[in-house]
Image (cartoon, grey):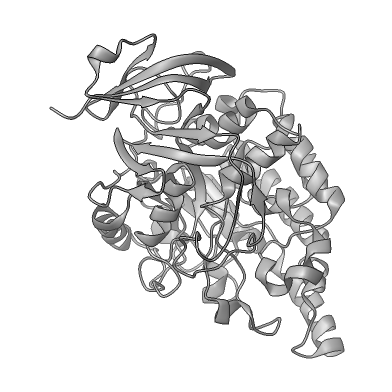
Amino acid sequence: MSERILIKNATIVNEGKSFEGDVLIANGLIEKVGNVSAVDADKVIDGTGKHLFPGIIDGQVHFRDPGLTHKGDLYTETKAAVAGGVTSFIDMPNTLPNILTEELLEEKYEIASKKSLANYSFFLGVSGANVDDVIKLDTTKFIGVSDDGLYFSGKGNILADNPDTLEKLFANCESIIAIHSEKETIVEENEKIYKEKFGEEVPAKYHPVIRNARGCYEATERAIKLAEKHGARLHILHLTTNDETVLFRNDIPLEEKKITTEVSVHHLWFTDKDYDRLGMLIKWNPAIKSQEDKDGLLKALLDDRIDLITTDHAPHTLEEKQQTYFKSMSGAPLIQHSLNCMLEFHRDGKISLEKIVEKMCHNPAKLYRMTKRGYIREGYYADLTLVDLNTEWTVSKENILYKCGWSPLEGTTFHSSVTQTFVNGNLVFDNGTFNEEARGRAIEFNQREIPSVANS
């Protein structure tokens, strides 16, 4: 029988409430929530003065395994994840090879079973090249299908730019279809203009001009109309503009939505003013945009037009980032610090702890119909994050755990820290020490079962 662990006297943040209580962990599950005697446990962790969250579920990461492991891999990036309170993730298909078949998907699950410290799931990649094969499959077997990142493998792989392909997918796919929403035609026109003006030396500050708000809005608007035509489940990844937020609903519960979206932490944290300071280090696709966009995204997150918070964690080496505009790789690492960023917003009075938990824990589990994850409930997997809201520390190369060894947040001082992270009841992270023996599990889900609002 596994060790019974009791977290005592923590402030539990769960399902819209914060209250002091205890959580007893046994056999990988939450056995009891409430007032628990220490005699029932083999080990007691004092949570006095700390806050206990469900484990963070990151719905969009690029962990680079297989084929791009010089940037990061399923061990190094999940080690960074659990240090940041993240216990589960969904990884994108733009590895080498691209994950475009069931066989490659199974191979990726096998790699994760050996390397991942966190729970894992993976999108099946879909593009114009394999869409006919994908729609022949029972897509309810997949947590979702996605084109995100596949444009790096060649032009024409962004579904939002190919309405005929997108419509075929919407008409035949039963799982979530998660897309990167930009019009490549608009991007290419702008790239040509700025290349003629600057050559290879386009300043980073023009990135949001090249990958502009119009390209995002037009792609998202068209995709939503096509999805609604077919009643498809469409999820727009990493929303970046205030204009796009009006395209999403907040008058029905998430369980009833077929059109959903998310915001990534960096689009809440940075603005276009930061390009002068950080340059290509904050070159992401879609681009970080204006203060107005940043403010609009936060507002839409708070009023439930935006459903999830993700990271789009995408590590590259410094050498790959610190190149001229057209050669610099898009994306950056973030998963170790995502909860810290959101807790800074809480400290500034911009968002409640309960709303952070809703968007980072509850809603990813709801949207992807995960089994027994995302909540602090008896009988659920013991994925838990214990946080001290009163510990000041500064991001530096010495405490960064990403394999690439850098972060655009270097020099940032946070005022909260993750002290313990449990994955399936295993204490995987404990005040800087890792349990290197524990491994996460494949996330179970049921795409056929529509969760009721009452039971979510």
**x and y, in percent, of residue 326 in the image:** 68, 82
| In this view, 456 is above or below 238 | above
- Residue at the (59%, 19%) spot, across then down: 16
- Residue at the (37%, 52%) spot, across then down: 136
| In this view, 392 is above or below 68 | above
**x and y, in percent, of residue 137 in the image:** 35, 50
Q: Can residue 310 be seen in this view?
A: no
Q: In which quarter of the image is the N terminus?
A: top left
Q: How many marks?
A: 0
Left or right, residue 49 beside residue 33: right
Q: Residue furthest left?
A: 1
Left or right, residue 109 beside residue 165: left
Q: Nearer the viewer, residue 297 or 55?
A: 55
Place residue 233 in its image quadrant.
top right
**x and y, in percent, of residue 215 in the image:** 77, 61
- Residue at the (54%, 14%) spot, across then down: 19
Left or right, residue 128 beside residue 220: left
| In this view, 64 is above or below 55 | below
**x and y, in percent, of residue 377 in the image:** 40, 19
Q: Which of 72 and 19 is in front in this view?
A: 19
Place residue 379 in its image quadrant.
top left
| In this view, 389 is above or below 77 | above
Q: Is residue 350 visible?
A: yes
- Residue at the (52%, 20%) spot, across then down: 11
